[in-house]
Amino acid sequence: MAQRQRKPEILHTEIVAKSRLFQIEQVHLRFSNDVERYYERMKGGGRGAVMIVPVHEGQLLLAREYAAGTHNYELGFPKGLIDPGELPCDAANRELQEEIGFGARSLTLLKELSLAPGYFASKMQIFLAEDLYESRLEGDEPEPIEVVPWSLSEWRTLLDEVDFSESRSVSALFLAQKHLELK
């Protein structure tokens, strides 16, 4: 196994752009070989996010909702931010109830993912939700989210769906497939 390199020293950070949702931070770094560079990254809010793979009666429950970035309706798993002071598993259960109308008696953390670690500081925890029960909470979505059931035995065909393209959802599907030992 290769020895880990020493992290670069952060010499200075500065917010160079800001919007209602995002802050871009410039980071001045010095590497172990004394080379200095400036990087820009999206400054994380420190809250983190969750994505949930709900399994109910032999089916995956997906959400089809509008995504402003692609200006399309995208098919994926329920997701959302962790509220201040909220545990990730509680956020996962809340998001399930807000987005697809189910709560979970069993939540299993599958993995924590980073989106684009060269540019984003935020992380997302992927949960498998099982033993679901009907329960709806009011969410902050501007329109109702379409819930799309998908047979667990047909999980591979989901990869052929044009609107199932978000990398985090694709990763979550494979993590669930591995955990559930689906063939």
Image (cartoon, helix red, strand yellow):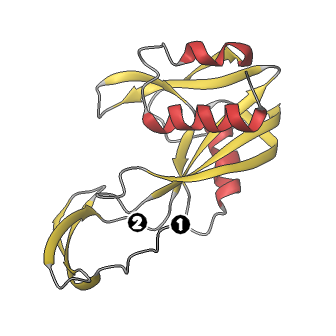
Front of the two marks 1 and 2 = 1
- At a point 70% along the width and 55% down the height, the residue shown is 90
Is tag 1's residue or tag 2's residue first in the polypeptide sequence?
Answer: 1
Is residue 135 among the parts visible in the rendering? no
Residue 1, which numbered label? 1
Q: Position of residue 63 (x, y in %)?
A: 56, 26
> SS for tag 2?
loop
- At a point 26% along the width and 83% down the height, the residue shown is 32
Q: Position of residue 137 (x, y in %)?
A: 67, 40
| Residue denoted by label 2 | 45
- At a point 64% along the width and 53% down the height, the residue shown is 91
Q: Position of residue 82 (x, y in %)?
A: 56, 57
Residue 132, which numbered label? none
Above or below for 21 versus 85 = above
> SS for tag 1?
loop
Indicate the amino acid at tag 1: Met
Whether residue 119 sits left or right of residue 167 in the image: it is left
- For the C terminus, the image quarter is top right
Quarter of the image holding residue 166?
top left
Whether residue 140 sits left or right of residue 41 in the image: it is right
Q: Residue furthest front?
A: 1
| Front in this rendered view, residue 5 or 179 | 5
- At a point 14% along the width and 79% down the height, the residue shown is 36
